[in-house]
Each structure stands twice: as C-alpha cells, then as structure tokens.
Amino acid sequence: MGAGANREDALTEQRILGVVLAGGRSSRFGSDKAMAVFDGRALAEHARALLLVHVETAVIAGRDGAIPDLPRADIGPLGGIAGALGYAASNGFTSVVTIACDMPWLPDGLLTVLSRRASAYCPDAPVLGHWEAGLLGNLLTHIEAVPRRSVRGWAEAIGAIPIPAGAPIPNANTPQDLETL
C-alpha cells in the first residue's frame, strides 16, 4: 500500500462531532438566549442545523447536564470546549467543531473550510473552531495555568490555523441584537 492509501484511510476514519456551546449565563440577554426564538426556532437549533451538514452528529452542550464543562462549570467557553473534547474522545470522535448558540447563520463556506482542518478557528469569533479531540489534556492544563481564559489565546498557543470569516458573523448577545438579525 502506498502513502496515498494510508492518507485516504486516515481521512475516512475521521469522526467529527459538532457541538453547539450553550452553557453561558446569558447575563446580557436577560433570559436563556440559546432557547430564544429566531425565525420560528431556538437559536441553538439554528446553530445545530449549520453543523449537521459538516459533522457526523451535532449536539447542544451546556443544557440539562449534557456534556458538562470541564474541569468545572462557570469558566466560560474554554470549559465548554474542554467538555466537548472530553465527550468526543470518550465516544470515538477524532475532532470537534464548536459554534456558539447565538450564531444562527455563518458566511458561506466558512464551516466547510473549518471542518476540513483541525485544529483551526475563526479569529473573528474564536469559539467557532475545529479542535482535535486529543487536545483535551493540553486545554485542561491551559485552563489551570493561564489566568486569562481566552479561546483565541489557547488557539494561538496550540498553533491552530486562523480561518477568517470573510464577512460579519451574526450573534445575539442582547434581545435587541436578536431583533436586528
């Protein structure tokens, strides 16, 4: 078997999990923004639908104990990403594509490019990324060692490839933001 065959085998063995990060407090929103209705369905469901085209399965994390943050709750998006990586690794997924619950659509082609490269992230919205499941230990160490819990900081620290959005990415941090989408 040639080197090309091994590369093909490796690509076919990729299992990508999609995770909508919905564990935030929604303090600026004033209510659970993941469940806020936009265009007939919850914001988190819009984000999940975006992922389904690019992943084997997509779940909403941070809700009702599904995929808890690691190493503990209330540490922000990195805790959600760590929880997603832990879930992925223990369920045979090789990587995770993450998206925030308040992103009901994305610029054309952005998820296609992200889903083909791990580890990669969108510098315009760093929570939007594709992370190798094997990075869980690195991320847990980063969370404990680095006081500023920035997704961008961790992405840069691991050498993740920045994939610019090329157009504005909508998000709804307040009810007014939702009304203007």
Image (cartoon, rainbow, N blue to C red):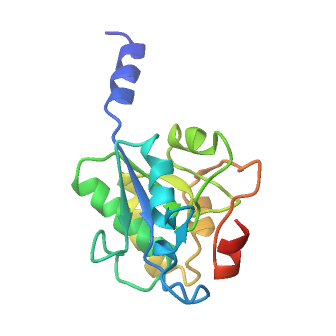
Question: How many tags in the picture?
Answer: 0
Instruction: Choose between 148 and 47: the one closer to the eye.
Output: 47
Task: Give x and y (percent) for residue 108.
Answer: 67, 42
Q: Residue furthest right?
A: 167
Task: Give x and y (percent) for residue 49.
Answer: 46, 51
Instruction: Please say whether residue 174 is visible from this viewpoint.
Output: no
Q: Is residue 106 above or below residue 87?
A: above
The part of the image, by quadrant, that contains residue 87 is bottom left
Residue at the image position 45 percent from the left and 72 percent from the top: 22
Q: Residue furthest top?
A: 1
Task: Give x and y (percent) for residue 160.
Answer: 58, 52
Residue at the image position 52 percent from the left and 60 percent from the top: 99
Q: Is residue 122 above or below residue 153?
A: above
Instruction: Choose between 84 and 29: the one closer to the eye.
Output: 29
Q: Quadrant of the N terminus?
A: top left
Instruction: Choose between 75 and 102: the one closer to the eye.
Output: 102
Q: Quadrant of the C terminus?
A: bottom right
